Structure formats: structure tokens, C-alpha cells
């Protein structure tokens, strides 16, 4: 069994390339799932279920978030990013929340106009505007709060984990 064998020294360049390839594959999977959700929602109406794709999107996001916070890497990434970029991660999270709310409002607006207006142009505009406005009112505050609060909580937990790791390494030395 290879479980109990000691790991040999690996070339750092190869490890980094493998990690980059895995990251690209993960991003490609997320893009394919997102496209599948959009296509199934618009073109197959209620015939196709999108639960599997949504589960993949949510679980992969949660897994990467939990792993980076539990290892203490998240706060380090935020600190390095804030030092090297013009916009802080907090500002980017707020913009992401705004964009997510706007995108979802547009999505629901177009979807309701497409599915329920029966081809009548004036009715399509009416459905789009009413659903778009209601979705903006609901989803922008929700996503802004979700992204901002989750970022602050994750950063705090990651800093605590990183500090605990530093304290543990001080005890060893």
C-alpha cells in the first residue's frame, strides 16, 4: 500500500504546474455548470432539472472557502492582495455582491419576459421591468450583505487560525 510510504521530495515547479492545471480544470467545470444552468433554464423550461449543476457550483465553492479559511491561507491572501492591488478585497467583495444582485435581477427579468409574456412586446417590457425592479430591491442588499459579511467572518477566522499556527510553531522551537 502506498498510504504508509514516505513522500519523496518533489520538484516545486512541477507541483505548481499541477496545481495550476487543477485550478484551470475547476474553473472550466464551474463555467460548464453555469452555462448548463442558463441553457436548461431558458430553453428547456421546466423539463430539465438544474439541481445537480447548482449542487456542484455550491459545494465546490464551499469546499474551497472552508479549506482556505481552515488552513489560515485566506487572511494571508487578502493581506498580499491588498498590498499589491489598487482595490482591496473588501471593495471587490462589495462590487461582486452588487454585480451578483444585478445579474440575477437581469436574469429573472429576461426569464419572466421570455416565458410568460406570450410574445407581446409591451407585455414583455412590463414583465421585465416589474420583475427586474423587484429582484433588484431583494437581491442587491442580500448579496452585498452576504459577500461582505462572509468575507469579514472568513478573514477573522483565518487570522485566528494563522495566529494559532504561529503560536504552535513558537512552542516547537
Image: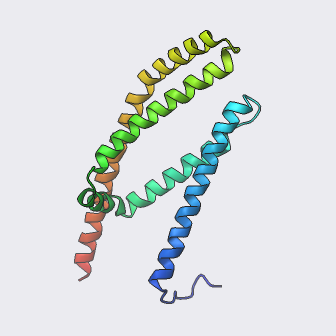
Number of marks in the image? 0
Q: Is residue 9 above or below residue 59?
A: below
Residue at 55 percent across and 46 percent down: it is 58
Residue at 55 percent across and 56 percent down: it is 27
Q: Quadrant of residue 146?
A: top left
Q: Is residue 59 above or below residue 84?
A: above
Depth order, front residue of 72/43? 43
Q: Is residue 160 above or below residue 109?
A: below
Quarter holding the N terminus?
bottom right
* Residue 24 at x, y percent in the picture: 55, 62
* Residue 79 at x, y percent in the picture: 26, 59
Residue at 34 percent across and 45 percent down: it is 92
Quarter holding the C terminus?
bottom left
The color scheme shown is rainbow
* Residue 15 at x, y percent in the picture: 49, 78
Depth order, front residue of 113/27? 113
In the figure, is residue 69 to the left or right of 88? right
Q: Quadrant of residue 53?
A: top right
Q: Is residue 118 above or below residue 11?
A: above
Depth order, front residue of 19/120? 120
Residue at 29 percent across and 44 percent down: it is 91
Amino acid at each position: 500500500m502506498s498510504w504508509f510510504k514516505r513522500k519523496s521530495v518533489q520538484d516545486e515547479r512541477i507541483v505548481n504546474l499541477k496545481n495550476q492545471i487543477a485550478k484551470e480544470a475547476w474553473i472550466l467545470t464551474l463555467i460548464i455548470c453555469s452555462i448548463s444552468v442558463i441553457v436548461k433554464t431558458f430553453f428547456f423550461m421546466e423539463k430539465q432539472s438544474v439541481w445537480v449543476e447548482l449542487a456542484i457550483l455550491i459545494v465546490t465553492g464551499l469546499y474551497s472557502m472552508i479549506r482556505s479559511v481552515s488552513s489560515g491561507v485566506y487572511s494571508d491572501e487578502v493581506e498580499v492582495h491588498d498590498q499589491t492591488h489598487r482595490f482591496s478585497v473588501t471593495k471587490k467583495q462589495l462590487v461582486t455582491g452588487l454585480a451578483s444582485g444585478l445579474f440575477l435581477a437581469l436574469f429573472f427579468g429576461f426569464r419572466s419576459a421570455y416565458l410568460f409574456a406570450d410574445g407581446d412586446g409591451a407585455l414583455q417590457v412590463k414583465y421585465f421591468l416589474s420583475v427586474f425592479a423587484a429582484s433588484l430591491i431583494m437581491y442587491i442588499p442580500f448579496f452585498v450583505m452576504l459577500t461582505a459579511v462572509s468575507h469579514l467572518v472568513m478573514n477573522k477566522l483565518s487570522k485566528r487560525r494563522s495566529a494559532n499556527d504561529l503560536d504552535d510553531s513558537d512552542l516547537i522551537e
